[in-house]
Image (spheres, rainbow, N blue to C red):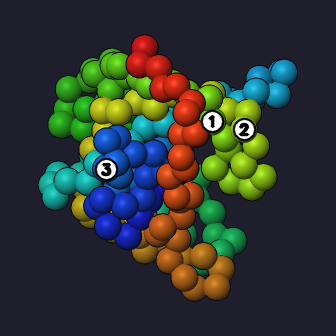
Amino acid sequence: MRWGSHARTGSEHSMGGDHSAGEIQIFHREMAGEIQAFSFMIRERFHPNNRHWTNIFSKFRSITSVGKTAVVLAPPRGIMDLLSDSMGKYDPSSILRVPIRYHGSQTTPPCDENVVWTIFPRALQLSTRQMTLLRNIRMEHGMKMAGNSRPTQSSTARPCIVT
């Protein structure tokens, strides 16, 4: 999960040059070594909290220093609950519409170019309060983790495919 210190910074991917407040990345390594990455943009909104993330965010309060952990139980419908509309409708397909795919690199060293990225441009909605909890998480030397994303890289003429 990546996030920034402001509502318009934090995502590693951008749409039309605009960044989101954050980005959730899920990785799957295939036997041949290729990595499939699924990325969901996060949009920050003032109110209300995303109820599907309440359990996860409540655990962040107990992680106050390096080495502290918290157990988070999966929601009843797994990842699909986390991707559903936070206003109460259960329609994860609305977020999964019109993904964009491209061949790219890992976002952490060694940044090998062996990743097939699938970006879901319709953003997940998290509240300012929930984003503030993320922004207050600190690393071992006391600095906030906000801004934990790699800068957007040039596409170097790689095609992006809308599926």
Q: Nearer the viewer, residue 5 or 90?
A: 5
- Residue plotted at (60% across, 76% down): 139
Mark closest to the chain's N terminus, 3 or 2: 3
Q: Position of residue 42 (x, y in %)?
A: 35, 46
Q: Mark 1: few, some, or many residues within 10 Å (few <14, many ≥20)?
A: some
Q: Is residue 34 above or below residue 6?
A: above
Q: Quadrant of residue 46?
A: bottom left
Q: Position of residue 116 (x, y in %)?
A: 63, 27
Q: Position of residue 137 (x, y in %)?
A: 49, 72
Mark closest to the chain's N terminus, 3 or 1: 3
**Element under label 3?**
strand
- Residue plotted at (26% across, 54% down): 44
- Residue plotted at (45% across, 45% down): 13
What is the CA distance from the residue labelled 3 to the residue labelled 2? 23 Å
Q: Is residue 126 above or below residue 118?
A: below
Residues at circles 1 and 2 in contact by the CB criterion of under 8 Å: yes
Residue that protrudes farthest toward the right in the picture:
32
Q: Which residue is mark 3?
A: 18
Q: Quadrant of residue 36?
A: top right
What is the CA distance from the residue labelled 1 to the residue labelled 2? 5 Å
Q: Amino acid at mark 2?
A: Glu
Q: Which residue is mark 2?
A: 113
Q: Amino acid at mark 1?
A: Gly
- Residue plotted at (52% across, 25% down): 159
Residues at circles 3 and 1 in contact by the CB criterion of under 8 Å: no
Q: Is residue 135 left or right of residue 74?
A: left
Q: Which residue is mark 1?
A: 104
